[in-house]
Amino acid sequence: MANYLIHYVEISESMPKASPDMERGNFSVSVVIPVFNEEQTVADIVNRTKKTLQNMGVSYEVLVIDDGSFDNSATICEEMQTNVVRCVHQGKGLALRSGFKLAKGDVVVTLDADGSHQPEEIPLVVEPIMDGKADFVIGSRFLNSKANKRKIPKINRIGNRLFNSLTGYISGIKISDSQSGFRAFRAALIQRMDLGSHGYEVESEMLIKALRLGARVMETPIHFDQRTMGASKLDPFRDGARILYAIITSYLS
């Protein structure tokens, strides 16, 4: 298992402790994959996700939350006998929130459907929670990885550094990738959050609220591949403004 960087190690008394039944054989994982027009990549991601979870030897479910795709993304996943929830297009944040309400696992994993995340690395974000070392694990694209940095547009890297700095300033932690969509967290933790994000700002809202609840947050290095099919849905300026707003309001709320 990879080394992980512990950023926050104290857990508050109000934070629910891990169940003694959460041994490897009884452990369950829900993977929530938000999808919007990813028919070229989603089948591969879902197949690899299922194979990885089977190899981990845990009970699992894969939930594809289709955010109003107008291509064949949802149909492809349904034909693969995958749980698909079709939503009206309102953004990644609302899609994830819909998935969280349905997830039945002890741990919830989120990853993107565009091929930028490697499903084979799910154990890297799940195992620290299974081992009782963390409550919230972020797969960092920037931790110890110069190769990943070169794959990400400069404006996105600049924005990420800004959000990392602001998150660190208000929370007192040092973090390398506050915007990563590849992460895992205990279901009991997410159930205590009153999430309101509709778009990409959901990652920041979740992180700030997890820290405010006293969660143990870790980062672990992951591989990252910039999408080669389709176009990114993130608008650096519009979504950047929303992320800044979410960081501040999540801290003040």
Image (spheres, grey):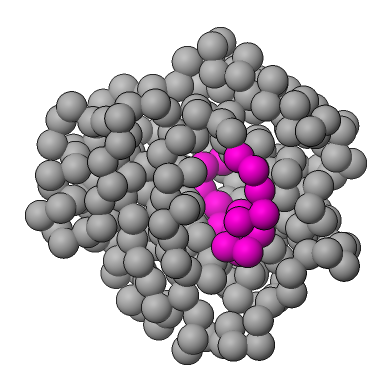
Picture coordinates of residue 222, whole percent (x, y) = 54, 52
Above or below, 72 relative to 231: below
The quadrant of the rendering that contains the C terminus is: top right
Looking at the image, which residue is at 69% across and 77% down?
18
Tell me: residue 84, above or below residue 54. above
Q: Is residue 86 one of those drawn in magenta?
A: no
Give me the residue at 53% from left, 71% from top.
106
Position of residue 181 in the picture relative to residue 192 (left or right)? left
Q: Nearer the viewer, residue 246 or 25?
A: 246
* One can see residue 218 in this view: yes
User: 123 and 147: which one is in front?
Assistant: 123
**Residue positioned most to the top:** 237
Quadrant, the N terminus: bottom right
**Number of callouts:** 0
| Residue stretch rendered in magenta on the structure | 180-195
Q: Quadrant of residue 51?
A: bottom left
* Residue 124 locus on image (x, y percent): 55, 64
Q: Residue at x 65, y 81 (%)?
A: 19
Is 184 covered by the magenta stretch?
yes
Residue 132 position within the rendered picture, expressed as x and y whole percent measured from the top left? 70, 76
**Residue 62 picture location, percent across and down:** 33, 61
Please say whether residue 179 is visible from this viewpoint.
no
User: Quadrant of the rendered structure where residue 191 is?
Assistant: bottom right
In the visual, does 136 lie left or right of 252?
left
In-image side of 94 versus 51 (left or right): right
Q: Residue at x 49, y 57 (%)?
A: 109
